Image (cartoon, rainbow, N blue to C red):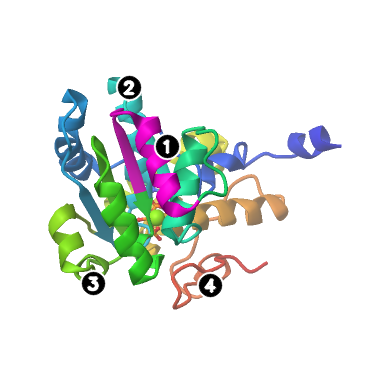
Amino acid sequence: MTMQWRDERIILLEPDILTENHLPQDVHARQTQMKEIEIRLTPITKGRKPVNCWLHGRPGAGKTATAQCILRKMQKEAGIRGVYVNCWENPTIFSVLECVARELRMLGAEKLSTSFKLERLKKHLNNERLIIVLDEIDQSPPKERNAILYNLHDLPRVGLVCICNSEHAYFDLEERVQSRLNPTRIFFDEYSAAELYGILNQRVRYALAPTAYTKQLLQTIANLAEGDARIAIQTLKNAAYLAEKDRHQKVRQIPETTEVGWCYHRLPTRHPPIVSS
Ligand SMILES: Nc1ncnc2c1ncn2[C@@H]1O[C@H](COP(=O)(O)OP(=O)(O)OP(=O)(O)O)[C@@H](O)[C@H]1O
Ligand SMILES: [Mg+2]
Protein backbone atom coordinates (compact mmCIF):
# COMPACT_ATOMS: atom_id res chain seq x y z
CA MET A 1 0.00 0.00 0.00
CA THR A 2 2.74 2.39 1.06
CA MET A 3 4.86 1.40 -1.93
CA GLN A 4 2.06 2.10 -4.34
CA TRP A 5 1.64 5.56 -2.84
CA ARG A 6 5.36 6.23 -3.07
CA ASP A 7 5.43 5.14 -6.68
CA GLU A 8 2.84 7.73 -7.51
CA ARG A 9 5.19 10.45 -6.38
CA ILE A 10 6.55 12.21 -9.36
CA ILE A 11 7.42 15.57 -7.81
CA LEU A 12 8.19 15.40 -4.10
CA LEU A 13 10.61 12.49 -3.91
CA GLU A 14 12.03 13.16 -0.42
CA PRO A 15 9.55 15.22 1.64
CA ASP A 16 11.69 14.82 4.79
CA ILE A 17 14.32 17.10 3.26
CA LEU A 18 11.79 19.93 3.36
CA THR A 19 10.72 19.45 6.97
CA GLU A 20 11.50 21.95 9.71
CA ASN A 21 13.82 19.58 11.55
CA HIS A 22 15.95 18.55 8.61
CA LEU A 23 19.48 19.75 9.29
CA PRO A 24 21.25 20.62 6.02
CA GLN A 25 24.86 19.58 5.35
CA ASP A 26 25.87 23.19 5.79
CA VAL A 27 24.03 26.43 6.36
CA HIS A 28 24.06 28.52 3.24
CA ALA A 29 25.02 32.23 3.57
CA ARG A 30 25.79 31.99 7.29
CA GLN A 31 29.57 31.61 7.07
CA THR A 32 30.13 34.91 8.87
CA GLN A 33 28.01 33.91 11.87
CA MET A 34 29.49 30.38 11.87
CA LYS A 35 32.99 31.85 12.00
CA GLU A 36 32.04 34.33 14.75
CA ILE A 37 30.64 31.53 16.91
CA GLU A 38 33.54 29.20 16.24
CA ILE A 39 36.07 31.86 17.25
CA ARG A 40 34.27 32.30 20.60
CA LEU A 41 34.01 28.57 21.26
CA THR A 42 37.51 27.55 20.14
CA PRO A 43 39.18 27.97 23.58
CA ILE A 44 37.19 24.94 24.70
CA THR A 45 39.25 22.75 22.35
CA LYS A 46 42.31 23.66 24.47
CA GLY A 47 40.43 22.90 27.66
CA ARG A 48 39.76 26.55 28.48
CA LYS A 49 36.45 28.20 29.22
CA PRO A 50 35.02 29.53 25.93
CA VAL A 51 33.28 32.85 25.38
CA ASN A 52 29.51 32.45 25.55
CA CYS A 53 27.42 33.43 22.52
CA TRP A 54 24.02 35.08 22.26
CA LEU A 55 22.41 34.58 18.85
CA HIS A 56 19.50 36.83 17.97
CA GLY A 57 17.42 37.75 14.94
CA ARG A 58 14.02 37.38 13.30
CA PRO A 59 12.23 34.03 12.90
CA GLY A 60 13.51 31.93 10.02
CA ALA A 61 16.94 33.61 10.01
CA GLY A 62 18.77 30.31 10.56
CA LYS A 63 19.77 30.67 14.24
CA THR A 64 18.75 27.17 15.30
CA ALA A 65 20.11 25.53 12.15
CA THR A 66 23.45 27.36 12.53
CA ALA A 67 23.81 26.41 16.21
CA GLN A 68 23.05 22.78 15.41
CA CYS A 69 25.59 22.76 12.60
CA ILE A 70 28.16 24.17 15.02
CA LEU A 71 27.44 21.38 17.52
CA ARG A 72 27.82 18.78 14.78
CA LYS A 73 31.08 20.37 13.59
CA MET A 74 32.63 20.67 17.06
CA GLN A 75 31.77 17.03 17.79
CA LYS A 76 33.17 15.81 14.48
CA GLU A 77 36.31 17.92 14.32
CA ALA A 78 37.28 18.34 17.97
CA GLY A 79 35.36 15.58 19.77
CA ILE A 80 33.54 18.16 21.91
CA ARG A 81 30.19 17.07 23.18
CA GLY A 82 27.18 19.26 22.62
CA VAL A 83 23.68 19.31 24.01
CA TYR A 84 20.73 21.11 22.45
CA VAL A 85 17.93 22.24 24.78
CA ASN A 86 14.72 23.93 23.67
CA CYS A 87 13.73 26.21 26.55
CA TRP A 88 10.21 26.58 25.23
CA GLU A 89 9.75 22.87 25.93
CA ASN A 90 12.04 22.97 29.00
CA PRO A 91 11.47 26.35 30.61
CA THR A 92 12.76 25.65 34.14
CA ILE A 93 16.25 25.00 35.50
CA PHE A 94 14.94 21.62 36.65
CA SER A 95 13.72 20.57 33.20
CA VAL A 96 16.83 21.95 31.47
CA LEU A 97 19.00 19.84 33.79
CA GLU A 98 16.80 16.81 33.11
CA CYS A 99 17.22 17.34 29.42
CA VAL A 100 21.02 17.67 29.74
CA ALA A 101 21.18 14.56 31.96
CA ARG A 102 19.13 12.60 29.43
CA GLU A 103 21.27 13.71 26.51
CA LEU A 104 24.45 12.81 28.39
CA ARG A 105 22.87 9.50 29.42
CA MET A 106 23.57 10.28 33.05
CA LEU A 107 22.23 7.61 35.32
CA GLY A 108 20.77 8.20 38.76
CA ALA A 109 19.81 11.81 38.17
CA GLU A 110 16.06 11.25 38.04
CA LYS A 111 13.65 12.91 40.40
CA LEU A 112 16.34 14.64 42.41
CA SER A 113 16.19 18.24 43.49
CA THR A 114 17.77 20.91 41.32
CA SER A 115 20.84 21.22 43.55
CA PHE A 116 21.38 17.46 43.53
CA LYS A 117 21.03 17.37 39.78
CA LEU A 118 23.62 20.13 39.47
CA GLU A 119 26.05 18.30 41.71
CA ARG A 120 25.52 15.09 39.72
CA LEU A 121 26.15 16.95 36.49
CA LYS A 122 29.37 18.48 37.85
CA LYS A 123 30.59 15.09 38.94
CA HIS A 124 29.55 13.44 35.71
CA LEU A 125 31.30 16.03 33.58
CA ASN A 126 34.42 15.76 35.71
CA ASN A 127 35.96 18.63 33.80
CA GLU A 128 34.87 17.21 30.46
CA ARG A 129 34.23 19.87 27.83
CA LEU A 130 30.66 20.58 26.85
CA ILE A 131 28.71 23.07 24.74
CA ILE A 132 25.09 23.67 25.68
CA VAL A 133 22.75 25.38 23.21
CA LEU A 134 19.82 27.03 24.98
CA ASP A 135 17.33 27.73 22.19
CA GLU A 136 14.32 30.01 22.75
CA ILE A 137 15.88 31.15 26.04
CA ASP A 138 13.43 34.07 26.18
CA GLN A 139 10.61 31.56 26.68
CA SER A 140 11.84 30.72 30.19
CA PRO A 141 10.29 32.91 32.89
CA PRO A 142 12.83 35.55 34.08
CA LYS A 143 13.54 33.86 37.41
CA GLU A 144 14.17 30.49 35.76
CA ARG A 145 16.18 32.11 32.96
CA ASN A 146 18.50 33.70 35.52
CA ALA A 147 18.86 30.41 37.39
CA ILE A 148 19.55 28.42 34.21
CA LEU A 149 22.25 30.80 32.99
CA TYR A 150 23.84 31.41 36.39
CA ASN A 151 24.16 27.72 37.22
CA LEU A 152 25.18 26.41 33.83
CA HIS A 153 27.75 29.15 33.36
CA ASP A 154 29.22 28.16 36.71
CA LEU A 155 30.20 24.73 35.38
CA PRO A 156 33.89 24.64 34.40
CA ARG A 157 34.70 24.05 30.71
CA VAL A 158 31.13 24.53 29.65
CA GLY A 159 30.25 27.01 26.90
CA LEU A 160 26.76 28.38 26.38
CA VAL A 161 25.12 29.35 23.11
CA CYS A 162 21.86 31.15 23.85
CA ILE A 163 19.31 31.81 21.12
CA CYS A 164 16.31 34.12 20.99
CA ASN A 165 14.59 36.58 18.68
CA SER A 166 15.55 39.80 20.37
CA GLU A 167 18.37 41.07 22.51
CA HIS A 168 15.92 42.18 25.20
CA ALA A 169 15.98 38.86 26.99
CA TYR A 170 19.68 39.45 27.63
CA PHE A 171 19.21 42.97 28.96
CA ASP A 172 16.36 41.72 31.17
CA LEU A 173 18.73 39.37 33.00
CA GLU A 174 19.88 40.20 36.49
CA GLU A 175 23.02 42.27 36.37
CA ARG A 176 25.13 39.65 38.10
CA VAL A 177 24.04 37.07 35.51
CA GLN A 178 24.76 39.49 32.66
CA SER A 179 28.16 40.20 34.10
CA ARG A 180 29.09 36.54 34.52
CA LEU A 181 27.70 35.39 31.19
CA ASN A 182 29.15 38.30 29.24
CA PRO A 183 28.32 36.78 25.86
CA THR A 184 29.27 37.95 22.40
CA ARG A 185 26.04 38.94 20.73
CA ILE A 186 25.76 37.70 17.15
CA PHE A 187 23.06 39.07 14.92
CA PHE A 188 21.26 37.08 12.23
CA ASP A 189 19.87 39.50 9.69
CA GLU A 190 17.03 38.61 7.36
CA TYR A 191 18.07 36.71 4.27
CA SER A 192 18.14 38.53 0.96
CA ALA A 193 16.08 37.05 -1.89
CA ALA A 194 19.32 35.82 -3.48
CA GLU A 195 20.32 34.03 -0.26
CA LEU A 196 16.89 32.43 0.03
CA TYR A 197 17.21 31.30 -3.57
CA GLY A 198 20.51 29.65 -2.63
CA ILE A 199 18.90 27.90 0.36
CA LEU A 200 16.01 26.64 -1.76
CA ASN A 201 18.33 25.54 -4.54
CA GLN A 202 20.44 23.56 -2.08
CA ARG A 203 17.36 21.73 -0.70
CA VAL A 204 15.37 21.22 -3.84
CA ARG A 205 18.02 19.10 -5.50
CA TYR A 206 17.55 16.37 -2.94
CA ALA A 207 13.84 16.80 -2.39
CA LEU A 208 12.18 17.22 -5.79
CA ALA A 209 12.47 15.43 -9.11
CA PRO A 210 14.86 17.45 -11.32
CA THR A 211 12.22 17.97 -13.97
CA ALA A 212 9.58 19.14 -11.48
CA TYR A 213 10.77 22.69 -10.88
CA THR A 214 12.32 25.66 -12.58
CA LYS A 215 14.81 28.28 -11.50
CA GLN A 216 12.06 30.85 -11.90
CA LEU A 217 9.82 29.05 -9.43
CA LEU A 218 12.56 29.17 -6.79
CA GLN A 219 13.21 32.83 -7.50
CA THR A 220 9.54 33.68 -7.14
CA ILE A 221 9.28 31.90 -3.81
CA ALA A 222 12.51 33.51 -2.61
CA ASN A 223 11.11 36.94 -3.46
CA LEU A 224 7.86 36.26 -1.64
CA ALA A 225 9.31 34.89 1.59
CA GLU A 226 10.49 38.25 2.94
CA GLY A 227 13.77 37.03 4.36
CA ASP A 228 12.38 34.01 6.21
CA ALA A 229 13.93 30.65 5.25
CA ARG A 230 11.23 28.68 7.05
CA ILE A 231 8.51 30.32 5.00
CA ALA A 232 10.49 29.84 1.78
CA ILE A 233 10.99 26.11 2.41
CA GLN A 234 7.41 25.53 3.55
CA THR A 235 6.08 27.40 0.54
CA LEU A 236 8.10 25.20 -1.77
CA LYS A 237 6.97 22.04 0.00
CA ASN A 238 3.33 23.03 -0.05
CA ALA A 239 3.45 24.10 -3.68
CA ALA A 240 4.95 20.69 -4.48
CA TYR A 241 2.22 18.89 -2.52
CA LEU A 242 -0.46 20.82 -4.34
CA ALA A 243 1.06 20.11 -7.75
CA GLU A 244 1.24 16.43 -6.85
CA LYS A 245 -2.33 16.41 -5.63
CA ASP A 246 -3.47 17.98 -8.89
CA ARG A 247 -1.37 15.45 -10.81
CA HIS A 248 0.78 18.05 -12.56
CA GLN A 249 4.16 17.02 -13.89
CA LYS A 250 5.75 20.22 -12.58
CA VAL A 251 5.27 22.56 -9.65
CA ARG A 252 3.32 25.37 -11.21
CA GLN A 253 4.88 28.78 -11.38
CA ILE A 254 3.62 30.86 -8.50
CA PRO A 255 2.10 34.04 -9.89
CA GLU A 256 3.12 37.11 -8.00
CA THR A 257 -0.31 38.63 -8.02
CA THR A 258 -3.68 37.19 -7.09
CA GLU A 259 -2.95 33.49 -7.03
CA VAL A 260 -0.15 33.86 -4.52
CA GLY A 261 -2.69 33.31 -1.79
CA TRP A 262 -3.19 29.63 -2.56
CA CYS A 263 0.39 28.90 -1.93
CA TYR A 264 1.56 31.62 0.34
CA HIS A 265 -0.39 33.22 3.06
CA ARG A 266 1.36 35.14 5.77
CA LEU A 267 -0.39 35.59 9.09
CA PRO A 268 0.74 38.03 11.77
CA THR A 269 2.24 35.21 13.87
CA ARG A 270 4.78 34.56 11.07
CA HIS A 271 4.29 30.85 11.61
CA PRO A 272 1.31 30.34 9.33
CA PRO A 273 -0.07 27.28 7.65
CA ILE A 274 0.95 28.46 4.23
CA VAL A 275 -1.28 26.48 1.93
CA SER A 276 -4.96 26.12 2.08
CA SER A 277 -6.19 23.30 -0.12
N1 LIG B 1 21.28 29.19 5.85
C1 LIG B 1 20.46 28.14 5.76
N2 LIG B 1 20.76 27.09 4.97
C2 LIG B 1 19.90 26.05 4.88
N3 LIG B 1 18.74 25.95 5.56
C3 LIG B 1 18.40 26.98 6.36
C4 LIG B 1 19.24 28.12 6.52
N4 LIG B 1 18.67 28.98 7.37
C5 LIG B 1 17.53 28.41 7.75
N5 LIG B 1 17.34 27.21 7.16
C6 LIG B 1 16.21 26.33 7.35
O1 LIG B 1 15.04 27.14 7.51
C7 LIG B 1 14.24 26.68 8.59
C8 LIG B 1 14.16 27.76 9.67
O2 LIG B 1 15.47 28.02 10.17
P1 LIG B 1 15.80 28.10 11.74
O3 LIG B 1 14.89 27.16 12.47
O4 LIG B 1 17.25 27.92 11.92
O5 LIG B 1 15.35 29.60 12.02
P2 LIG B 1 15.44 30.40 13.40
O6 LIG B 1 16.25 31.62 13.15
O7 LIG B 1 15.88 29.47 14.48
O8 LIG B 1 13.90 30.83 13.59
P3 LIG B 1 13.06 31.01 14.97
O9 LIG B 1 13.50 32.29 15.58
O10 LIG B 1 11.62 31.08 14.52
O11 LIG B 1 13.32 29.81 15.83
C9 LIG B 1 14.88 25.38 9.08
O12 LIG B 1 14.27 24.30 8.44
C10 LIG B 1 16.33 25.53 8.64
O13 LIG B 1 16.93 24.27 8.42
MG1 LIG C 1 14.92 28.64 16.10
**Outermost right residue:** 1
What percent of the width, then of the height, locates residue 275? Answer: 59, 65
Give the label, 1 or 2, closer to the camera. Answer: 2
Q: Amino acid at mark 4?
A: Gly
Q: Is residue 19 magenta?
A: no
Q: Amino acid at mark 1?
A: Pro
- Magenta range is 113-133
Dot 2: element: loop
Dot 1: element: loop
Q: Amino acid at mark 2?
A: Gly
Give the label, 3 or 4, closer to the camera. Answer: 3
Whichever of labels 4 and 1 marks the residue nearer the N terminus, that label is: 1
Q: What residue is pinned by disc 4?
A: 261
Whether label 3 touches label 4, CB < 8 Å: no
Whether label 2 touches label 4, CB < 8 Å: no
Whichever of labels 1 and 2 marks the residue nearer the N terminus, that label is: 1
Q: Amino acid at mark 3?
A: Asp
What percent of the width, then of the height, locates residue 234? Answer: 51, 56
Which residue is depicted at the point 33% across and 28% down? 126
